[in-house]
């Protein structure tokens, strides 16, 4: 007998937690501890809400993992994917074959992307797309006869994914510590994180200084050895770090001066998050490669890729470029391409990017920034629909807590969880990335719940003398 999951799972929370704990090793988790405690089992979703198997209705202010931009419950995508799966569930794009979903999505992306970008290489997600970037930039320079241009410069506290290549590009120390990363040929400079590292400097001076570290690193390595610089326009997993205005133009200037390819990892920022189709437009930069995933399909199916500028494509497509010995079994998977196409249809039909720029974004920002008067909050910041609040024991100095980093953030996150709000903690920074479809009432609910959880957190750390 098969019951629809929504009918039988509710009764089965305990059983599901048990088998999940016994057999499902989960990403970025202390698995022993998690198995012991039992994972929260999510059952269904609609709009900006998710429900767990105990029937709790939870406001998901993170859009899953920064991906469900158009909200949950779009049957239109499910139907289109079902139709595609009946017609052609799979075929590869390796051996001189392709299919209409891949061709149509490629064309669509070329239309949406900045003008100098007209090609795409498909992957299954962001990590493998960044691995593609490593292969691409080295192949590009080798094809141009500059084989020594191999090193990629990235940033501390960046997140570019979790494969060996992508985690090496990333600058997460706790990831590097496991598995002897980064791999050779990838080096890191400091991030433009004014709140935590800017000290007494004004943000614009600090932004320039941090950008100029790229120039120093290029001079140190020799420009003949440097292939590319990679950065997220706004660092997401690092804590929604919005760089000072001075940062990106200076990075662009340096990349141009030394002939270094610029890779914008827009896995989070792309497809509307900052109020334009791409954050490269928001920050006025001209990347040679753009990493995409997450919002491309609103997470309905796993698809990512690299948007490739004419400058790079011309070399890869040239006779000397020859065969690019790289690809994934699921590159351009037809069902995922259809999910992405439908997602983009919905974004355009409902003018969601415009909504972020002119309605939701401004309203969310105004509401979110009201949290900055809370005694625990050192800074509230937001752009488009990504935001953060910094928790601090001392607003004036922006000092970190004496307690181990993440102690207070975790307390706050747990209060959010208990009060049916998904807000994520990165250390002691609380972050949000809500759906583009969030109503003003839901924004009010989000901010009210966030404030409530800040109050409870303050109460607890005061009672426990955490400072
Ligand atoms: C999530 C993320 C990735 C990795 O994407 P996956 O689909 O998890 O492989 C890469 N870059 C950025 C900026 C991300 O946020």
Image (cartoon, rainbow, N blue to C red):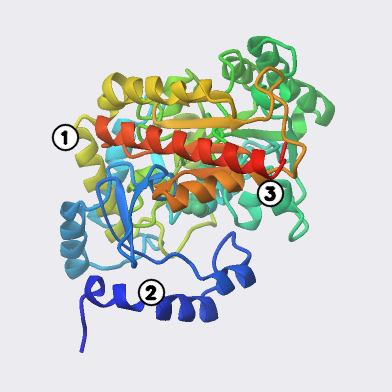
Do callouts 1 and 2 mark residues in contact (Cβ within 8 Å)?
Answer: no
- Dot 3, crowdedness within 10 Å: few (<14), some or many (≥20)? many
Residue situated furthest front in the rendering: 463
Compared with residue 187, is residue 244 higher up or lower down, i.e. above or below?
A: above
Instruction: Indicate the quadrant containing the N terminus: top left, top right, bottom left or bottom right.
Output: bottom left
Beta carbon of the mark 1 residue lies under 8 A of ligand 1: no
Q: Which residue is mark 1?
A: 349
**From the image, which quarter does the C terminus lie in?**
top right
Q: Is residue 462 above or below residue 78?
A: above
The label on residue 216 is none
Q: Which mark is residue 168?
A: 3
Determine the image quadrant of residue 152: top right
Image quadrant in which you'd find residue 141: top right
User: How many residues crowd around disc 2 within 10 Å: few (fewer than 14), some, or many (20 or more)?
Assistant: some
Q: CA distance from mark 3 to mark 2?
A: 38 Å
State how many labels appear: 3
- Please name which of the two marks, 3 or 2, marks the residue nearer to the observer: 2
Q: Residue furthest bottom?
A: 1
Where's residue 325, x and y in %?
54, 57
């Amino acid at each position: 007998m098969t019951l629809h999951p929504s009918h039988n799972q509710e009764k089965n929370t305990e059983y599901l937690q048990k088998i999940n704990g016994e057999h499902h090793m989960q990403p970025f988790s202390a698995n022993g501890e998690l198995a012991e405690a039992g994972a929260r089992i999510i059952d269904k979703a609609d709009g900006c809400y998710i429900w767990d198997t105990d029937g709790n209705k939870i406001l998901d202010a993170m859009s899953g993992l920064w991906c469900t931009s158009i909200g949950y419950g779009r049957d239109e995508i499910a139907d289109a994917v079902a139709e595609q799966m009946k017609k052609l569930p799979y075929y590869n794009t390796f051996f001189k074959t392709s299919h209409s979903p891949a061709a149509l999505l490629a064309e669509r992306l070329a239309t949406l992307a900045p003008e100098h970008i007209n090609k795409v290489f498909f992957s299954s997600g962001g990590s493998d797309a960044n691995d593609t970037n490593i292969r691409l930039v080295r192949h590009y320079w080798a094809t141009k006869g500059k084989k020594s241009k191999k090193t990629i410069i990235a940033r501390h506290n960046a997140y570019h994914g979790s494969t060996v290549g992508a985690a090496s590009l990333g600058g997460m120390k706790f990831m590097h510590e496991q598995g002897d990363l980064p791999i050779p040929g990838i080096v890191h400079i400091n991030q433009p994180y004014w709140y935590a590292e800017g000290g007494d400097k004004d943000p614009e001076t600090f932004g320039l200084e941090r950008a100029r570290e790229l120039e120093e690193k290029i001079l140190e390595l020799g420009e003949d050895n440097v292939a590319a610089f990679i950065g997220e326009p706004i660092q997401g997993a690092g804590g929604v770090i919005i760089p000072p205005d001075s940062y990106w133009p200076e990075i662009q200037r340096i990349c141009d001066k030394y002939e270094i390819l610029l890779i914008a990892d827009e896995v989070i920022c792309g497809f509307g998050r900052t109020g334009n189709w791409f954050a490269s437009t928001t920050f006025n930069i001209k990347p040679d490669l753009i990493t995409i995933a997450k919002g491309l399909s609103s997470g309905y199916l796993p698809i990512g890729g690299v948007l490739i500028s004419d400058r790079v494509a011309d070399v890869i497509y040239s006779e000397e470029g020859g065969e690019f010995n790289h690809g994934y079994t699921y590159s351009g998977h037809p069902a995922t391409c259809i999910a992405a196409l439908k997602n983009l249809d919905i974004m355009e039909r409902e003018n969601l990017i415009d909504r972020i720029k002119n309605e939701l974004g401004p309203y969310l920002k105004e509401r979110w920034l009201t949290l900055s008067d809370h005694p625990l909050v050192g800074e509230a910041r937001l752009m488009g629909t990504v935001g953060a609040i910094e928790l601090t024991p001392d607003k004036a100095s922006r000092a970190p807590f004496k307690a181990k980093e993440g102690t207070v953030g975790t307390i706050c996150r747990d209060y959010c969880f208990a009060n049916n709000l998904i807000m994520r903690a990165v250390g002691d920074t609380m972050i949000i990335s809500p759906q583009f479809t969030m109503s003003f009432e839901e924004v009010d609910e989000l901010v009210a719940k966030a404030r409530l959880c800040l109050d409870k957190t303050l109460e607890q750390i005061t009672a426990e003398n955490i400072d």
